[in-house]
Structures are given as structure tokens and as C-alpha cells.
Image: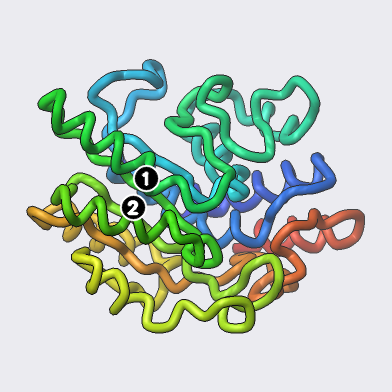
């Protein structure tokens, strides 16, 4: 089935703004920057079945930067895992859509995340299990750039290369900002592409990591890579699609309210 990714990413951004506004809290900036990667995966590349979320042969997705859950939930709702109207229950008591993904409660969530730095390790385990079981599924994992300051990320990077996990395809949402400021101010990542190459990974760098077509080409190239995992570095815009949130660190972890919420919705509706 062919999907209109432009229409889908627009709807996802609308859903993110509406759900975070309804919650009165959340992480819109990093959710909006990650939309295009998640949409390209769920609507063009991943082998999944929303009617059977635990299908053993499905591709897996790990949202290592778990605070971007609104983006994942928007994709899952659009893909048919649960009703879109449930999105406005984000972070509410007794909702199955909490501030970080929970694989035990939310249909379509493959890994509970939120403690930063752990997602790639989980993805490696899934890929190793698939190899042992003789299965051919891929494991996709999305990391944040601030998250990449965590030491466990680099232990997992070394492990994936050592075990030649070519069915692990990772994405780095490199929007340049984290909760306390810019990456360079908090803890510079340096030449991040060179670091991943030094750890034995195939590296693809996308100057526009919000371009679904470029993301799709990179995924196809990654799936053709044999004997090593692939890191796709996506240079993205924090708060993408909302004018006053773009490249603004203060929108990492707060919800737009009142007039600002209306302005945000007007921006994404105009995309």
C-alpha cells in the first residue's frame, strides 16, 4: 500500500501538538524533530501488522529517546494500532499512553524506554535473538543527540559492531539541543560521524534529516549493508513545523498553552 508521507507527517505534527496541549506537559520539541524518521519507517519500510502487534516475524522499533513518545503514539494511531481519539489521553491517569512508552500497555510498542542510553542495548538484544531464532527481521532504534553523551550508548555501539549486527539500523536525531541548552554547551559530541565509524559502523549522514525521501534512500542503503550495523545521522530541526518552537531549547519539555497552542496548531495545519 502506498502512503502519502507528506499528509501523514502533517497529521502526526497536529496530533503531537494537540496531545501535548491536552496533557499540559510533555516534550514537543524532540517529538516534532523525530516525526519524519518515524513516519518513513512505519509507513514505508517496516514489516508490521497492526492487527497482530506481537507477530514474531515483525520488524522492531525502539524509541531510545523515550520522551519523544508523542511522535511514536501519533504514528501508531495513524497506522491503526489504536484509535486516534485516544491520543488526547496522553499522560493522564489510567491512560495507556504515558509520558514514556510502555510495551506492556501500549499496542505496537516494542520496548519500554525513558531511561536514556539504554535503547541501543535493547535493540542489540532483539537482533541477537532474531539471529538465534533464524528470523530475518530488522531492529530500528532512534537515539537523541543529548542521549549520546551516555556511556552505555558507546558500549552498545561496540557490541553491535563486534557481533556484526547488520539487522540493527540506528538513527541519531541530531537537532543540536537538549534540555539544558545546546549540545556544544552541555557536552560536545565532536565529530559524531567519525566516532560511529571508529566504532565499526556504516555511517550515513543526512544534511536534512526531516526529508522523508532522503531518509527512505538511507534506509534502503542500510538494509543492503552486510556485516556491520548502520547509523543514519539525521540533522533535524528541533520543534520542526511550529515556527516559534524551531531551534528553541525552551520547547524541549513544556507544552504550548492558550494562544501559543492555537499558534502552534495554525502552523502545522498550514504545512
Label 1 crowd bin: few (<14), some (14–19), many (20+), radius 10 Å = many
Cα gap from disc 2 to disc 1, whole angstroms = 5 Å
Q: Please, is residue 120 above or below residue 209 in the view?
A: above
Label 2 crowd bin: few (<14), some (14–19), many (20+), radius 10 Å = many
- Secondary structure under the numbered disc 2 in the rendered image: helix
Badge number at residue 64: none
Q: How is colour applied across the structure in the image?
A: rainbow
Is 245 on the left-hand or right-hand side of 207?
A: right
Contact between labelled residues 1 and 2, with CB atoms less than 8 Å apart: yes
- Secondary structure under the numbered disc 1 in the rendered image: helix
145 and 136: which one is in front? 145
Residue 11, visible in the rendered structure: no
Residue 169, visible in the rendered structure: yes
Q: Please, is residue 61 above or below residue 89 in the view?
A: below
* Residue carrying label 2: 156
- The quadrant of the rendering that contains the C terminus is bottom right
* Residue carrying label 1: 121
Residue 95 spot, x, y in % from top left: 72, 24
Nearer the N terminus, badge 2 or badge 1?
Answer: 1
Residue 47 spot, x, y in % from top left: 27, 33
Residue 257 spot, x, y in % from top left: 87, 54
- The quadrant of the rendering that contains the N terminus is top left
Amino acid at each position: 500500500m502506498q502512503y502519502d508521507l507528506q499528509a501523514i507527517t502533517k497529521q502526526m505534527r497536529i496530533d503531537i501538538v494537540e496531545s501535548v496541549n491536552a496533557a499540559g506537559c510533555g516534550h514537543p520539541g524532540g517529538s516534532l524533530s523525530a516525526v519524519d524518521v518515524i513516519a518513513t519507517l512505519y509507513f514505508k519500510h517496516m514489516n508490521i501488522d497492526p492487527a497482530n502487534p506481537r507477530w514474531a516475524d515483525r520488524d522492531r522499533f525502539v524509541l531510545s529517546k523515550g520522551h519523544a513518545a508523542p511522535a511514536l503514539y501519533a504514528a501508531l494511531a495513524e497506522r491503526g494500532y489504536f484509535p486516534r481519539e485516544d491520543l488526547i489521553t496522553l499522560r493522564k491517569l489510567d491512560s495507556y499512553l504515558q509520558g514514556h512508552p510502555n510495551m506492556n500497555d501500549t499496542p505496537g510498542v516494542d520496548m519500554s524506554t525513558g531511561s536514556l542510553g539504554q535503547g541501543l542495548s535493547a535493540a542489540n538484544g532483539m537482533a541477537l535473538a532474531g539471529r538465534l531464532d533464524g528470523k530475518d527481521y530488522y531492529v530500528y532504534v532512534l537515539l537523541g543527540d543529548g542521549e549520546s553523551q551516555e556511556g552505555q550508548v558507546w558500549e552498545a555501539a561496540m557490541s553491535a559492531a563486534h557481533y556484526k549486527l547488520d539487522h540493527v539500523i540506528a538513527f541519531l536525531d541530531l537537532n543540536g539541543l537538549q534540555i539544558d541548552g545546546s549540545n556544544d554547551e552541555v557536552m560536545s559530541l565532536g565529530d559524531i560521524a567519525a566516532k560511529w565509524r571508529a566504532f565499526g559502523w556504516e555511517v550515513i549522514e543526512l544534511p536534512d534529516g526531516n526529508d522523508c525521501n532522503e531518509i527512505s534512500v538511507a534506509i534502503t542503503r542500510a538494509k543492503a549493508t552486510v556485516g556491520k550495523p548502520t547509523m543514519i545521522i539525521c540533522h533535524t530541526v528541533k520543534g520542526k513545523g511550529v515556527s516559534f518552537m524551531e531551534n528553541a531549547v525552551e520547547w524541549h519539555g513544556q507544552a504550548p498553552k492558550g494562544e501559543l497552542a492555537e499558534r502552534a496548531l495554525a502552523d502545522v495545519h498550514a504545512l
